[in-house]
Structures are given as structure tokens and as C-alpha cells.
Amino acid sequence: MQTNKVGLTSKTYDVDDFAAAQEFYHSNGWTDGLPVVPPTEAAVEACLEWGLMRPDQLIGIEPVRAQPITAEKLAINAVMAGCLPMHFPVVATAWQAMMKEEFLLHGVTSSTGGCAILVIINGPIRREIGAVSTFNALANSDRATAVIGRALRLALINLLDVRGGGIDRTTLGHPGKFSYCLAEDEEDTVWQPLSLVRGIPEGLSAVTVMAALAPRQIMNEWTTEPKEILETFAAEMRANQRHYSIYGGNYAIVIPKQLREHIQAAGWTKRDIAEFIYERARIRRGEWADVGKAAIVRDRAEKIHTALESPDHLLVVAAGGPAGGFGAVIPPWMGSKTKAVTAAIGACVDCEPPKG
Amino acid sequence: MTLRVFDPTNETKMAGIEPAVRPFSLQGKTVGFISNGKEGTTGYFTQLDRMLRQDLGVADVVWRTKSNYSAPADPHIIDDVRNWHAVVTGVGD
């Protein structure tokens, strides 16, 4: 063990070769089970230089356990995940968003509920990093989204000890805990980007983070009517309320091109979609009795639970391949205990201007 | 070729947090329970309450429940902790 002399202060270790590095990191519990890119000085410094960050720059402090997260440590994990320097600003901004109090990072990462952190990228940076918003959008569509999503998870494991059986008490989890990142298809839609809908000025790049369960895929190829198409999405949300959690929170829906074009052609905006879904995605508490949960209906069978607390809580994302009448509903981890957070990359949109 | 690689873990230690002194005995002491409020905690804590009083001579057991089972304990509960000799908390479903 030695101390690096050129600005990076993390402990260093000498390993014989690439294969030895893999065994070293795995044996220390520092991976997600997949091979990692050895974080060398040159690779880590390149990330920091691209992000214009000093190694000791504070990305944020985890609110519950008061753990500081520095740019150096985040860059080490980003390199391990396979990030190129140009991916690092997205990783750093996503982490800043995750540490906002309303995101409830500790609950999100420790809960038995087993959610992952979904990252949605908007703005010009999508194209700069080569993020692909079309084919296979929710899976391994491209290098950038794969490694950015993975970097968030590796950093959780290594910087906050979010390991299964440790801080992470997840019962099942889902594959999004390896990587869960997509970019919106802004070029092929007339809708406003998600970031703009959520208050980020037009033209800025941004990330939105959401504590999310696995995507639930829907299919409706047999209509062009927006209400019928969206009814299928709402029905999937109602199913989630019945089978998982009845409580309202942030849901995301991903609408690929085929269904999107029908909705757009009818002149529907994202706001129109959100208002329709808000009205349709709701169930009576008594429906719990239909799915084996009569014990918790109690005397409130007629109480109505909306899947969204308001239309503002629906994240509508344009993404997916060009053909196929499919879509996805991405439910929240657990009602409104956590809120999705959107943050601009490389800009502060709510900072006070300098005085004097 | 030898590679020099970095430690990815958070080497920074939290400042100013020291574990409380552990009591040698619970005889005559006050023990607090902080429940996350989930259904399964009631039976567990009821049994533990009985064991603490009957088997270990605990003088008083104070029950508190968090308002949000996924968030840290509420400030008024943290304030109450100062009056207890030991606290029991954890995951419960």
C-alpha cells in the first residue's frame, strides 16, 4: 500500500496484471460480480479533468450517515464500471441528484423492496456520449447508458457499503441493479424533453433519477386512439397497485415510436397524457381483497388510491425502437416516500447570481 | 505488467460519531424500542418486552414508532433516546 503523490489520495495497490486485478477487486467485495476496468491513475485523472473537478471536490454528503462523496472516489468507481471521461459528468450529476434529501437515498438503497436507481438522460450530452434512445432502449442499447448506470451501482456498493446483506436488505431486487439508464429520444418526438417538463431550461443537458422497480411491458397494437393506448398503461399501473403497492408516487412510462406517433398525431402533449393517466390509474382499496390482501383492506374498502399523487408525478419518456406497439410502465419503489430528482449537468439552474 | 490501481471504497471516516458505552447489565435500566411501524414488529417487540422485563430485570421499556419506515427516526424520538440506557431497532417486516 502506498500513497499516491500527484493529487489523488486514495490508497494504491500493485497487482501483477489485468487478471490479477479482477481477482483482487472481486476478493475485496468491490465489484457487482462482473469484471471491472482497473482504475489506474491515468484513467481516474482523465475523468476528473474532463469533469473539471479536483480530486477532493465534494460531490455531496449522504444525508443519513453523513458520508462525504468526493469526485476522486466517484471517478475511481466510474472507471471500474467502464466509463470514459466524457461519461463522468453524467455520473457525478446523477449522484448529486441522488443525495438530495427528497430522494431518500438511504431508504432507497437499504429497503427490502429492492428497487434500482433509474437514470434518464436528456439534452445535447446524449449525442455527445453516444447514448442510443431507440432499439433496446431499456436494456443494453449502447455503451454510454450501460456504463453510466453501472457506475452508480458500483459507487453505491463501494462508497456507501450497499451490499446485499449489509446496508442493502433487498429481498429480491431486479436486473436494473446492474445498470438502469436510458436516454430520451428527443429527435424523434414533438414532445418536450422530460428535463424541460421538470423545470430544466431548454437546451441544457440533465439527468433524472428515480427509485424504480423493474419495467412492466405492455402491448396494444390494435388501436390508434390515445385514450385506448393510454388505458393499457393505466391498467398496468392499476395492476401494480393491486399486486405491489397501492400508494401513489412517481411512475415513469416509456412510449416508443409506434404508439407515440398515434398519440402525437391526435395532438396530445405529455401534460395531456399525465392528466389522463392520473384520472385512470387508481383503484379502490377493496380491490386488495381480490388479490389475497383482504387482511389490510380493513374498514376502508371504498377509499380510492391514485397511482399518482398528481399528474406532475408521471415521468413520460419518449424512447424505444421504431416498430412494435409496446410500452413500459416503471413503478416507484414505494409510494411517495422518495421523489424523482432532476438536475442539470454542468450548470446550476437555481443558484443565486453572484452579488456585487 | 504490474498495474497500480486505486481503492474504490470510502476511506473517509465519519467525524464525531462515537458508539455509546455498553451497559454491563440491564437490571433496573430503561430500554427503548424504535419500531419501523411495520406489521411484523408488534409481535416481535411484544415478546422482547416480556423477556427484558421478566428475564433481565429491565425497569421500563419505552416503545416509539417512526413516522416513515424507510427514513431515519424522527427528531423527537432521537431526543427521547437520551433518556434510555439501551435501544433496540432494526429491520422488521
Image (cartoon, coloured by chain):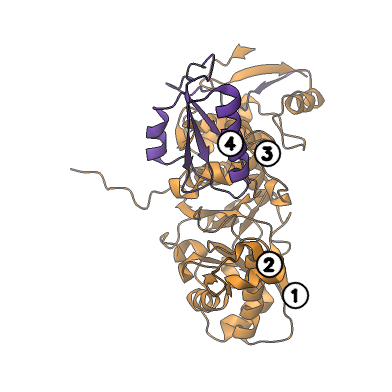
Chain colours: A orange, B purple
The chain ID associated with circle 4 is B
The amino acid pointed to by label 2 is Gly
Chain identity of mark 1: A
Name the side, left or right, on which A15 lies relative to A346. Answer: right
Q: CA distance from mark 4 to mark 3?
A: 32 Å
Q: Which residue is mark 2?
A: A320
Residue A45 visible? The answer is no
SS of the residue under disc 3: helix
Q: CA distance from mark 2 to mark 1?
A: 9 Å
Badges 2 and 1: C-beta atoms under 8 Å apart?
yes
Label 4: which residue? B90
* Residue A271 percent coordinates (x, y): 48, 75
Q: Are marks 3 and 2 on the same chain?
A: yes
Residue displayed at 53% across by 81% down: A268
| Residue in view at x 27 percent, y 48 percent | A353
| Tag shown at residue A324 | 1
In the image, are marks 4 and 3 on the same chain?
no
Pointer 3: what residue? Answer: A81
Quadrant (top left, top right, bottom left, bottom right) of the N terminus of chain A: top right
Name the chain under label 2.
A
